[in-house]
């Protein structure tokens, strides 16, 4: 992909919009991200394949994936892959995000092929640090999304808020973190474990041998505690905005440590809101997630759960 050098005037108009776009993505505001990306596109009427434009679109589509706007994100990601060079990092990042979309749509066969393609071309990222960053995030995200894919559409009992809250409080008082993780892991449908193993054997194990050694052995990955940790990671990711939006009732009370927030079912209500968006109907899983969230302060949880993107910016030093 030929890189056209931008003028100083062009860069002066572009940089504030890129910053605005990244703020929208960080705040989980997909509409604002789409709007910022559209304004960036207006600056590139001379080149619809410029890497700065395609990267802006990827940021916006990643925000849409996090908001579960899957059809819109899918069309956009396919478009970016068609415009980006096949050997570019942009193509790899778009492919990874598209694989997440396909997993959530329960298109596992298509997702596996795409993940394999991304991994087989991962050495196209020439920077060792960036390649390792991307590789680690890709594997963690895909394994979490395999679990989420099989949680979507499940139903196993009444999702009664008072019962879920009472069980969450019981778990909080009587069980350690590891015990709750095991409970969550045992709540994950067997199909989720099978999909995780399938994706690992077909796609992830295509990593170069030195990198495969960094992965936990399959028997470790399948232990209920580890499955529970992966499930909690993806569930807190999709619940982050519900719990952590600054003007939400639960965040206002939680951040001020008002006792009522723990006594009146606010945590279970927030979990059920998220579960409803993803059609997850597992009451014991909901109680386990609510119990773990209540162990944190608002500041701790919201920092921990804030979605980390698959895309890597130039100033991103987190491995």
Image (spheres, rainbow, N blue to C red):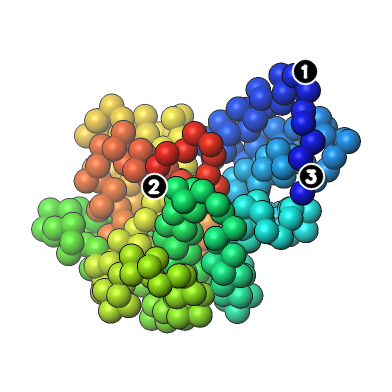
Residue at position x 26%, y 74% in the image: 220
- The Cα–Cα distance between marks 2 and 3, rounded to whole angstroms, is 30 Å
* Left or right, residue 77 beside residue 165: right
Describe residue 8's horizontal placement relative to residue 308 as left or right.
right
Label at residue 2: 3
Q: Which residue is mark 2?
A: 319
Disc 3 or 1, which lies upstream in sequence?
A: 3
In this rendering, the label closer to the viewer, 2 or 3: 3
Residue 174 sits above or below residue 112 on the image: above
Q: Position of residue 90 (x, y in %)?
A: 65, 51
Q: Quadrant of residue 251?
A: top left
Residue 213 or 68: which is nearer the viewer?
213
Where in the figure is residue 147, as x and y percent of width and height?
Answer: 43, 69
**Which residue is denoted by mark 1 in the rendering?**
9
Tag 3, which secondary structure?
loop
What residue is shown at x 25% (from left), y 46% (from top)? Answer: 294
């Amino acid at each position: 992909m030929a890189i056209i050098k931008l003028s100083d005037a062009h860069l002066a108009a572009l940089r504030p919009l890129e910053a605005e776009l990244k703020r929208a993505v960080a705040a989980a505001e997909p509409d604002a991200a789409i709007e910022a990306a559209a304004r960036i596109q207006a600056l590139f009427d001379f080149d619809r394949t410029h890497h700065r434009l395609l990267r802006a679109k990827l940021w916006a589509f990643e925000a849409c994936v996090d908001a579960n706007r899957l059809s819109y994100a899918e069309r956009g990601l396919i478009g970016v892959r068609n415009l980006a060079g096949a050997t570019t990092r942009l193509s790899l990042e778009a492919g990874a995000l598209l694989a997440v979309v396909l997993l959530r749509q329960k298109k596992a066969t298509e997702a596996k092929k795409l993940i394999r393609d991304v991994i087989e071309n991962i050495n196209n990222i020439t920077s060792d640090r960036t390649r390792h960053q991307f590789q680690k995030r890709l594997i963690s995200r895909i394994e979490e999304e395999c679990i989420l894919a099989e949680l979507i559409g499940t139903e196993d009992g009444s999702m009664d808020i008072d019962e879920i809250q009472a069980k969450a409080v019981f778990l909080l008082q009587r069980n350690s973190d590891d015990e709750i993780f095991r409970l969550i892991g045992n709540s994950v449908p067997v199909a989720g474990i099978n999909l995780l193993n399938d994706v690992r054997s077909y796609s992830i194990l295509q990593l170069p041998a030195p990198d495969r050694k960094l992965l936990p052995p399959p028997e470790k990955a399948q232990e209920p505690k580890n499955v529970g940790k992966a499930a909690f990671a993806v569930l807190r990711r999709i619940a982050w905005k519900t719990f952590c939006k600054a003007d939400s009732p639960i965040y206002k009370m939680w951040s001020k440590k008002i006792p009522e927030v723990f006594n009146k079912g606010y945590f279970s209500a927030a979990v059920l809101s998220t579960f409803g968006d993803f059609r997850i109907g597992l009451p014991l899983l909901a109680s386990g997630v609510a119990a773990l969230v209540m162990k944190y302060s608002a500041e701790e949880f919201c920092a921990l759960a804030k979605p980390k993107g698959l895309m890597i910016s130039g100033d991103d030093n987190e491995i």
